[in-house]
Image (spheres, helix red, strand yellow):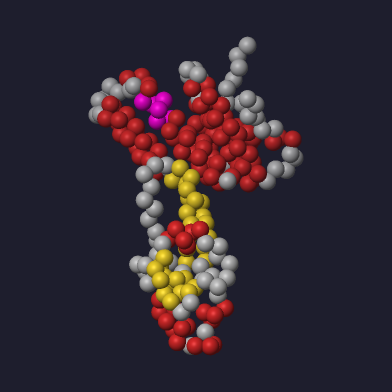
Amino acid sequence: MEPITLPVKFDGWFKVQHIILPTEEWFERELAKGDTSIIRLYTGVYFSNGKNIFKYYNNEVTTVELSEIVERNTEGTTISRCSQDYVSICFLRKCYINLCQQIFNARAFDKCWNKNKIDSELIFKRDMVWMAINVIKYMVEFN
Amino acid sequence: MDCVCHNILNLCPQDADVIHNLKNKTSCEYLDLLKKVEKGYRPDYEFILEEISLLGIHNKIDKREFVLQYYLNNPWETVIS
């Protein structure tokens, strides 16, 4: 199975629907079988060539929009659908790294550095974000 | 908010249960801390940081059951009267 990249612009809990359709080759092969074809068992025959989605109805092949596939009741059709939850905290992680970087930059290579010298507000923010990242992980674990 | 898990009542708690309960307690305490921060307070949250660190390394330390029970049965904020 090929890995997928989810284009998320913000962190959150996402429900992703995976739609699996037969290929165009499968459709042509089944159509060529005539009466023994499995196609006649379906009330809705949908297939894809990887770019477009097609519907076979009344001996006619038409292009359909993705929205139809998403909303369509899959029973009796060639559509397989499953949904999966994904949680993204990549922006929160980035925020944590940025805060660590800021603290590091404030510290620099000063030999006389001590904890009190660093902006305590930055440390507080870093700790809050670190706690949030971990608590989110626990919460996702518990669903 | 009372986030203390009285897990000590279970005589032989499974390790996974203890971890689960500690994660639950930590989550609850963090939400408690957030509410206080929103209201302008700055309570000492060191105990929550320790709990999270412990959850990250709990399987690498000896006599962890005692350490886990300590964090499980003590509140994050000590009220000084």
Membership of B51 in magenta stretch: no
Q: Can you tell which quarter of the image residue B59 is in?
A: top right
Could you tell me residue A51's position as x and y percent? 35, 67
Could you tell me residue A3's position as x and y percent? 40, 61
Q: Nearer the viewer, residue B66 or A4?
A: A4
Q: Nearer the viewer, residue A75 or A107?
A: A75
Membership of A126 in magenta stretch: yes
Q: Residue placed at 75% from the left, 40% from the top?
A: B11
Magenta region: A122-127
Does residue B61 appear in this view? no
* Secondary structure that dominates the magenta span: helix
Residue lying furthest top: B81
Q: Can you tell which quarter of the image residue B22 is in?
A: top right
In the picture, measured across the screen, residue B46 lies left or right of residue A108, that is right
Could you tell me residue A30's position as x and y percent? 47, 83
Q: Is residue B79 above or below residue A104?
A: above
In the picture, measured across the screen, residue B40 lies left or right of residue A106, that is right
Q: Residue placed at 30% from the left, 30% from the top?
A: A102
